[in-house]
Image (spheres, rainbow, N blue to C red):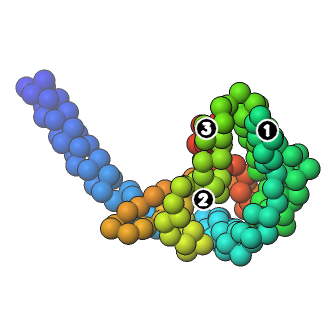
Amino acid sequence: MRSLTISFVVSLIMILGCKEKKVEQTLAPAAKDTLVSTHPDTTEIRESVQGFFAWYEQHQDALGHIRFVQDTPHHLKLNEDSLHAYLELLRSSGFISDELLENETRFYQACAKIWKTQKENEIPAGLAMDRFHCALDYIAPYKNGQVSSELHGDSALATLTLHGHNSEQADFHYQMRKENGKWLLSKLMCNSGVEY
């Protein structure tokens, strides 16, 4: 009789546990979304990402005039002084951390090493797409994209979701760092095929 009662209780716990998990799985995302959308840091991260892309859109011409990649007779070459000027212009946006500038410097230095060994008809390493758009085709206004984030103390992973034609959707990821009370872009999660 006792083993029958124990079996019944165990079965009941398992059934209730499964039901509880199902409820948890269906309710958790909605509860999480509500929490994320109302947390002050997620609002600030969204404003920072969208603010950067509004600035970036306005300064495309100025950024494009800074030629930090030079074409030489044998291969491309990185002009470090021009790269520094380019990165300083990005810093002036107010949305970029020193960490991102260091990461981008390392990225282009790694590219420059690869350029020395590439053949003339090859697409130069790291230059196939815009680093901030992380795309070959501009599919939507990045400044208006939907931004979600995962917080980890003073760092976060921000995801910018864009919707294009024919219900196309693309996600772009950026590491963020909170410095002096402001969320700044700290690393571009754009895989350009270059380790740095």
Which amino acid does the dot numbered 2 rest on?
A: His
Residue 174 visible, this orientation: no
Q: Which residue is mark 2?
A: 133
| Picture layout, residue 172 above or below residue 117 | below
Q: Position of residue 1 (x, y in %)?
A: 7, 26
**Secondary-structure class at tag 1:** loop
Asked whether disc 2 touches disc 3, contact meaning CB atoms under 8 Å apart, the reply is no
What is the quadrant of residue 65 in the picture? bottom right
Q: Position of residue 172 (x, y in %)?
A: 54, 55
Instruction: Please name whichever residue, 1 or 57, is drawn nearer the observer in this view of the structure.
Output: 57
Is 37 placed left or right of 54 in the picture?
Answer: left
Q: Estimate how packed mark 1 is, as few (under 14), some (14 to 19) or many (20 or more) residues with alpha carbons within 10 Å.
A: few
**N-terminal-most mark, 2 or 1:** 1
Q: Which callout, 2 or 3, points to the residue nearer the camera?
A: 3
Residue sitting at 72 percent across and 34 percent down? 115
Q: Estimate how packed mark 3 is, as few (under 14), some (14 to 19) or many (20 or more) residues with alpha carbons within 10 Å.
A: few
Is 11 placed left or right of 48 in the picture?
Answer: left
Q: Which residue is mark 1?
A: 73
Instruction: Please name whichever residue, 196 or 159, is drawn nearer the observer in this view of the structure.
Output: 196
Residue sitting at 68 percent across and 54 percent down? 176
Residue 97 visible, this orientation: yes
Residue sitting at 78 percent across and 45 percent down? 71
The quarter of the image holding the C terminus is: top right
Instruction: Please name whichever residue, 185 or 2, is drawn nearer the observer in this view of the structure.
Output: 185
Q: Which residue is mark 3?
A: 121
